Image: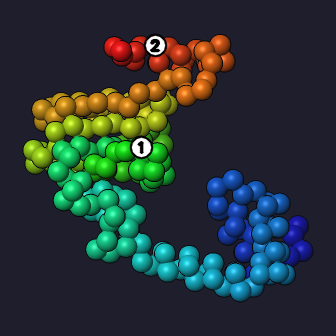
Amino acid sequence: MSSYSPKLTRLIDALRRLPGVGPKSAQRMALHLLQRDREGAAFLARSVSEAMEGINQCPRTRMFCEPDHCGFCSARRDDTGQLCVVENPADLLAIESGTGYRGRYFVLMGRLSPLDGIGPEQLGLSLLIEQLSKGDVRELIIATNPTVEGEATAHYIAELAKARVVKVTRIAHGVPMGGELEYVDGGTLNHAFAGRQLL
């Protein structure tokens, strides 16, 4: 049984909600904030509160944004005719910072997983269909992760796009840059081999 005060226990429990933070890490963080950085703790509390109240999802990209300001919606992005579908906001940021892609995005906020109760409705696919039906998307780029659920999601979305006569492409998966074939797992190598391209 914990001998912490109720408020300290709640603070530790709150910090444990963060990904990758276990009981000991949460305890260290809580004690650090109380002992050495109360000003930082107050700033953190205000920032979290302001974010929860002021950040929503863009109705078009489904990316997190402040009202009337989605940095990923612009006429310049529309002009590319490209729409990239990603599973989550972190994937969008990775593509934006790691590639030269500057088209539109659609963030699923997950992937199809019937066992977890995640179907087309939870991923906002009716909104995606609406965007594809307008006729201004010439290429749909599917950038879901190479997991079983990610592949199933990619296939499902590809069928939706093809039914609306939209060109569908899938990002390549395979051997990482600088990797050596002998160390690559069989599934990754098979995927890379199947997706080979002309030089």
In terms of secondary structure, where does tag 2 sit? Answer: helix
Q: Position of residue 45 (x, y in %)?
A: 62, 80
Q: Which residue is mark 2?
A: 193
Left or right side of 59 for 99: right
* Residue type for callout 1: Thr
State the residue lying farthest toward the front: 199
Left or right side of 97 for 133: left
Up the image or down, 77 lies above or below 178; here it is below
Left or right side of 159 for 97: right
Which label sits on residue 136?
none
Which label sits on residue 99?
1
Label 2 with label 1: CB-CB less than 8 Å = no
Q: CA distance from mark 2 to mark 1?
A: 23 Å
* Residue type for callout 2: Phe
Left or right side of 100 for 90: right
Q: Residue at x 26, y 45 (%)?
A: 83
Quadrant where the N terminus is found in the figure: bottom right
Up the image or down, 144 lies above or below 24; here it is above
